Amino acid sequence: MIDKELLGMLGNNKKYIFYSVSLMILKLIANIGVTATVCGMLFMLTLGAGIKTYISLGIVAVVCIIFKYISTIYIEKLKDILGRNVKKELRQKTYNKIVKLGVNSTDNASMAALTQMSMEGIEQLDLYYSSYIPQFFYAMIAPIILFFVTVWIDWRVALVLILCVPLIPVSIIAVSKYAKKIFAKYWDKYTSMGDVFLDSVQGLKELKIFKADQAQHNKINESAEQFRKITMKVLVMQLASTTIMDLVAYGGAGLGISMAVIGMTSGRLDAIQALFLILVAVDFFLPLRAFGSAFHIAMNGVSAGKKILTLLDSAEPEWGNEDIEKADLKLENVTFSYDGKRDVLKNVNMQFPEHSMTSIVGESGCGKSTTVNMLLGAYRCKLGQVTVDGKSINNLSRGAYYSHLALVSYNTYIFNETIRQNFMLAKNDATEKEIFSALEKVNLLDFVKENGGLDKVINEGAENISGGQRQRLALAISLVSNKDIYIFDEATSNIDIESEAIIMKNIKLLAQTKTVIVISHRLANVVESDRIYFMKNGEVCECGNHEELIKLDGGYAKLYFTQKELEEGYNMEEEICRK
């Protein structure tokens, strides 16, 4: 009933569970005190006791009631503290894990699933920790305390009540296996529905263009219907188990009350003793009844917690603590496989010297993007090694390595912040002079000044600027960061000719002082590279500068001339259309 792995995630917050359970026990003792004083007053009434006796018993009852009230307040405060601490620490752990995993963080989970896991999932775990676990320990202890209180009055009634108590956990265990399966499916359907919805929102423009919005609408409805059905199964299961627990709880209490009444009629108990046993009989079952109600919340929390544990247990890329001085990258006999079976990269050797422009080209699926991920440290070699300044990337400090590295890709993310704040992310002390200089290099200075200046807010997804402007802005931000290694992964993909020319001009200038690596499908952009690697099927087939590769008359030359013919034909068609 208690998951040890999830309990272990509490750390120092376990003390709040101890405090909460201790107060709950003291509250129970105070409740017993109130019941005892009420019965005592009735007993004194039969004896005709004086007013002082009633006042004394009344004071005891009031003290117990006040203590119950104060205990209730502090129990809720402790649970609130526990819940807030758990949420804060789990969200921090989840965020830190995603950061440590880096670009590889979403390989096994979609963005919607990660969002739901770190938000709704942690909310469910909050209830598991703050409500379920304290109630579990209290429910185990409370019946034992009540047994030792009542056994001195009538051991028969006490024994019947304590023997009926385990029937509630038995009923919970009986449904727990089924409940775990249901809640696991529930969480899967929930995240699946989130994936479909997020996917639909992000691709709404394309859905409209292709007139596929109705089909996607039907898909969302289908996903929502599946979620509705699993939700109804959860509710039916909860209702059935609640009904069983109620029958056990009130049946057991009724049996204990019947035994007390029989004891009174047989003369074994007096009326006051029987009344006390009748009043505390329900208290035997209420803690476990409340625990049973929290069980369903807990199962949802456990399902979410298992997903979070899976994420937190994900293997992280290895990093060391060494620093680097030279931005001299190499891939030495690198072999890599995603699944451990089929090699995506095969014995790849590449050098990326300082103050040079090195390009990686090839047809789609040749291994260019995988090579980039190897350089970024997102993937680690099956065989061979990636070295920087002669040191294996595994031995480098993660922070130190990334402090030397910048990536500009075809989908570089521009945050929904002002232009100034986007630059501050790359360099928190960037001056306006530095920012304006970078914007001028990418021919965006006039545009920015005419459209709100550095305080212009970039909309989500950079919707309020063109694709070319977005890529040039991403380049400008990278220029301000002033790194030693620049990787351009299809940075000129799907943009206008003017923006492409500006970006390539800056790349060539950067190569004079930095280590520049260019991945491009368009070979016209890599002609001036100091070195070009032509890849095919995960292997380096050809290596050299443009002239050398053309003379080889191999795969590079064929691809280059094929693209050149296509571009010339396209330009000729455009010229005819203009005439």
Image (cartoon, rainbow, N blue to C red):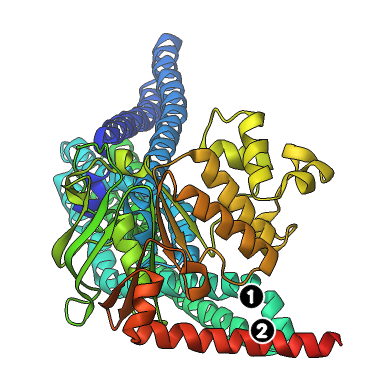
Residue 203 - label: 1
Please tell me which residue is depicted at 21% across the width and 58% down the height of the picture: 166
Is residue 240 visible in this depiction of the protein? Answer: no
| Residue nearest the viewer, comparing 509 with 432 | 509
The quarter of the picture where residue 50 lies is: top left
* Residue type marked 1: Gly
Total numbered badges shown on the rendered structure: 2
| Residue nearest the viewer, comparing 347 with 37 | 347
Image quadrant occupied by the N terminus: bottom left
Q: Position of residue 233 (x, y in %)?
A: 45, 78
Please tell me which residue is depicted at 32% across the width and 75% down the height of the picture: 181
Label 2 or label 1, whichever comes before in sequence order: 1
Q: Position of residue 243 (x, y in %)?
A: 41, 69
| Residue nearest the viewer, comparing 448 with 300 | 448
| Residue nearest the viewer, comparing 363 with 181 | 363
Residue 367 - label: none
Task: Check the image and name the residue furthest to the right.
Answer: 579
Question: Is 572 situated above or below 541?
Answer: below
Using residue 21 as the reference point, say whether residue 391 is left or right of it.
left
Residue with the mark numbered 2: 217
Question: Is 253 situated above or below 456?
Answer: below
Image quadrant occupied by the C terminus: bottom right
Q: Position of residue 479 (x, y in %)?
A: 53, 44
Q: How crowded is mark 2: few (under 14 residues within 10 Å), some or many (20 or more)?
A: some
* Residue type marked 2: His
Question: Is 295 situated above or below 451?
Answer: below
Using residue 166 as the reference point, say whether residue 579 is left or right of it.
right
Q: How crowded is mark 1: few (under 14 residues within 10 Å), some or many (20 or more)?
A: few
- Residue at disc 2, secondary structure: helix
Question: Is 8 situated above or below 212?
Answer: above
